[in-house]
Amino acid sequence: MHSTNSGGPAVGVIGGSGLYEMDGLDQIEMKEIRTPFGEPSDRVILGRIDGRRVCFLPRHGVGHRFLPHEINHRANIWALRSLNVRWLVSVSAVGSLREELEPRHIVVPDQLIDRTGTGAKHTFFGRGIAAHVGFADPYCTDLRGLLLAAARSLAPAVHDGGTYLCMNGPAFSTRAEASMHRMLGADVIGMTNAPEARLCREAEIAAAALALVTDYDCWKTDEAPVDVETVIANLHANSAMAKRIVRHLIPSIPESPASPSHKVLDTAIFTPRDLWPAETARDLEPILGCLR
């Protein structure tokens, strides 16, 4: 396995539930990528929007074949980084934990609570190379600002900031869990964004999330508990808007990586370079190549 890195820095888009394709792409190419961490969710769709390289990956696979806990996030992010993706927009369906965040509203979160507890599966490091990245602010401030501006120019109800709580699925929350999540200070809840954000930080990819509210989870007693039928109906409406927002965002993203997110490994790696195991360094070539 080796890096397929070619071309200039690219913008990546990971589509969540209901978003399995990207509109407006020219010069489309489908690329199947093998990674040291297994198979990505699907082939990566490469193309250009207004001349910018764009790499799109459906998080759950085309046809929604993978449950949240089955997604190989390491393979997904490795595959995108191997294609020189340096900015990533994660489009995610979420439940609302706040009255004011209504179904079909859009949230651009600025914080995370990770309750997935999957540990080693959410880091590229180990196997002889130790690294500890800073993660106090889990989303890139620069990209988040651009995404917020793009969303506000098109969508009627966009919320700046909020805490995304990432839980294990595939079942939705109990009422007791939903109450606990609200007490923890979370604003929206989903099942996928925390591992993506962590791995993007390690891969020096500037990441931001576009959270699409589909339901009120089950904490709101005057609303019916979340069900798949309601989620799907709201997903269709949200996904159409998400495509427009991402299409509008891409031309505004800088062409050269210059965010603090693009240089976190300068100070994060503890293991001296001369002690890096050859196999581990080779597997992490798309991430570590510029440091060698």
Image (spheres, grey):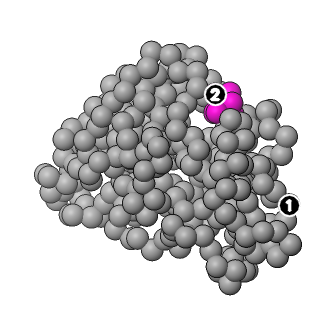
Residue at the image point whose x is 34% and y is 68% from the top: 120
Instruction: Left or right? Give the position of 137 relative to 157.
Output: left
Residue 23 x/y as whole percent: 58, 26
Tag 1 secondary structure: loop
Quadrant containing the C terminus is top left
* Residue 4, above or below 104: above
Is residue 135 found inside the magenta-colored segment of the image? Answer: no
The single residue placed furthest to the bottom in the displayed view is 176
Look at the numbered disc 2 and give the secondary structure of its residue: helix
Taking the spot 79% from the left edge, 33% from the top edge, the residue there is: 154
State the residue position of label 1: 100
Residue type of the residue flagged with mark 2: Arg
Residue 4 screen position, x and y as percent: 28, 31
Instruction: Determine the CA span between mark 1 and mark 2.
Output: 27 Å
Q: Quadrant of residue 24?
A: top right
Q: Nearer the viewer, residue 224 or 13?
A: 224
